[in-house]
Amino acid sequence: MEILVKELTVLVNIFCFLVPVIPVTLKIAVVSFILALILGLIVALMKVSHFGIFKLTARVYVDVIRGIPLLVQIFFIYFGLGKILNLEQLPASILAISICYSAYLGEIIRAGIEAIPKGQVDASRSLGMNTYQTMRYIVLPQAFRIVLPPISNEFIACLKDTSLVSIIGLRELTRAGREYYSQYFVDFETWFMVGLIYLAMTVALSKVSHFIETKYKIT
Amino acid sequence: MILIDNISKYFGNTVALENVSCEIRTSEITAVIGPSGGGKTTLLRCINGLELPDSGEISVDGIVLTKKTAGIIRKEVGMVFQQFNLFPHLSVLRNVTIAQQVVKRKKTIEAEETASSLLQKVGLEDKITCYHCQLSGGQQQRVAIARALALNPKIMLFDEPTSNLDPEMTKEVLNVIRNLAKEGMTMIIASHEMGFAQEVANKILFMDNGTIVEEGTPQEIFNSPKHDRTIRFLSKIMRC
């Protein structure tokens, strides 16, 4: 009984220590992901455009970014580019994650756009809508519904990948866990609690994405 | 009104249209008949600028069709597709209002008024809040007709509008087209409904292998076809 109480106290202590940094992790994930979505949309539109140069640029971009580990990109941007541009840890982290995820999201969005039947574009064009209007009002709203599940998948992956930026010293969830551990030397409980908090966030996220999916479903 | 001057269109090595010329006058109803793959659809798609001919020239109301003028011409020319192509993410009402709002920049109320009167015209005023999945094929095609009419086009193109419908639904769609004919709308209809073509059209084009094989009034084509190919096609179709 006494052991149990002691154990619970430790866990509660760790939890209280970690709670203040949860918003940092969330902030990195959300901001990076929004930027990645915008970049990814641009990449996707370049890939489906009729201009060879856009297509090629987008393809090279995706291949390069997708082919390098995120951790290496973080090092490159923080230690490499960061020195020249004088980037702090937070902007460097957000930049690295958003660039990395934009490549994956770009491919997902492209697949979504290409999944829309050609007849939709024909109908839209025949009604006098130009390429931009067709994309904006007909193709993208339908593609959005198709790509919602894979995109929420990517967001969950992105949230977990924010733990990588702990390595350049940004004090987010994983970093704070390491701090607690080096202070009190309780390894099992610390990493158990860190894992539990990540899990709670991702489970909550999949609930939210499931809700959005049902709301926008086309039957 | 529409002048088609010696147009050809190729998809790779396949000939879709070859040296096609014809003229369509205001208020004239032209039925394009012929076997599948004969070039009917491609001809209609060219008039709408969905495909640009590889050679030759199309002009609508004096405007020569190019990549640049296609947008202007499409506002004058409505098109109805074999596959309906309704926008599944939009309600029936939005399907009919969207082009008015986006292309003609009409206000929502104004666009919705036009849309409801058009939906009433095609007999679907009670379906405005539905989505395409809640409609039968015939109802979907009638919404598609209302959608094309929403921009107030001078010409309507029908690309086999009833080929995906059962006989009962075919009838309801043909009735809508028949009413448009009475109003004096200029129309080009690609169809396999020979009876309907004979009834409403002023002119029949018989197409095969990408060319217009024979052209004439319904009487000429159906009662005394001159060309061998036309005779063979009609005898096959009329027998069943």
Image (cartoon, coloured by chain):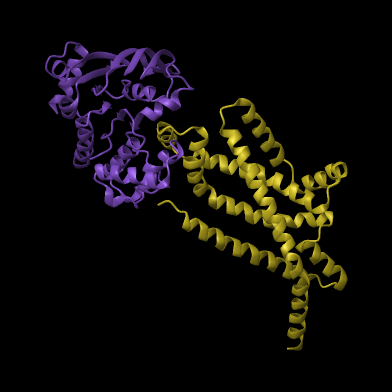
Chain colours: A yellow, B purple
In the rendered view, tell whether residue A116 sits above or below residue A194. above
Quadrant containing the N terminus of chain B is: top left
Q: How many marks?
A: 0
**Residue in the foreground of this view, choosing between B219 and A12:** B219
Q: Is residue B37 left or right of residue B232?
A: right
**Residue in the foreground of this view, choosing between B170 and B119:** B119
Residue B81 image offset from top left, x and y in percent: 33, 33
Quadrant containing the C terminus of chain B is: top left
Residue in the image at 26% along x and 42% along y? B138
Residue in the image at 88% along x and 44% along y? A83
Q: Is residue A86 left or right of residue B2?
A: right
Q: Is residue A79 left or right of residue A120?
A: right
Question: Does residue B50 show up?
Answer: no
Q: Quadrant of residue A12?
A: bottom right
Q: Is residue A37 left or right of residue A4?
A: left
Q: Quadrant of residue B216?
A: top left
Q: Quadrant of residue B148?
A: top left
In the rendered view, tell whether residue B204 sits above or below residue A59. above
Residue in the image at 37% along x and 41% along y? B86
**Residue in the foreground of this view, choosing between B33 and B31:** B31
Residue in the image at 36% along x and 35% along y? B151
Question: Does residue B173 show up?
Answer: yes
Residue B184 image offset from top left, x and y in percent: 23, 28
Q: Residue furthest bottom?
A: A1
**Residue in the foreground of this view, choosing between B142 and B116:** B116
Residue A213 image offset from top left, x and y in percent: 50, 56
